[in-house]
Amino acid sequence: MALIDVAGSSEVKENATFSARVDGVRLLLTRVDGTVHAVENRCPHLGLSMARGKVEGSVITCPWHGSSFDVCTGENRDWITAVAGVKVPDWSRGLIAFGKKPTGVRTFPAREENGRVLVDV
């Protein structure tokens, strides 16, 4: 495991996002019950950044199309529920998905040492 220093511990907050780029990988860090978690800052729907997404507990919601993901496991929780933050009717969700199936986000092992957040990218 090759841990890379990504952020100061105080920069990563509960119910908030911290974004960074490491070795060409866009990362998104957040805390869940005090523990730091790292996911790829790339929604699997269209590859857009989730840095402005809403974090509630362990779930982040993509600000672009409303897909939501568990930041602890990467699991997809909901797929395409909005366009630019505006809810869409259920019947239109398939159209907005552009044929893409629900997919999770990539997670990365993260830990804290000496006031720093280290991630294995």
Image (spheres, rainbow, N blue to C red):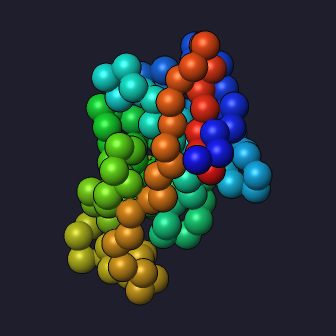
Q: How far across and how far down the image is residue 67, in percent?
A: 38, 58
Tell me: 91 left or right of 20: left
Observer-nearest residue: 25 or 100?
A: 25
In depth, the one of 43 and 40 nearer the eye is 40
Q: Residue 30: in sight, yes or no? A: no
Q: Position of residue 57 (x, y in %)?
A: 29, 32
Q: Residue at x 41, y 86 (%)?
A: 99
Q: Residue pushed farthest bottom? A: 99
- Count of numbered circles on the image: 0
Would you identify the image quadrant in which residue 12 lies? top right
Residue name at image x 59 percent, y 26 percent: 117
Q: Is residue 118 placed above or below 1 in the rendered structure? A: above
Outermost residue toward the right? 23
Q: Is residue 24 visible?
A: yes
Extreme residue in the front direction: 1
The residue depicted at 51 percent of the width and 48 percent of the height is 108
Q: Is 118 left or right of 74, judged from the image as shown?
A: right
Residue sitting at 45 percent across and 37 percent down?
37
Q: Looking at the picture, does residue 4 appear above or below residue 78?
A: above
The x, y position of residue 68, in whole percent, is: 35, 53
Expressed as whole percent of the image width and height from the top left, the position of residue 97 reads 41, 76
Pick the residue in front: 66 or 2: 2
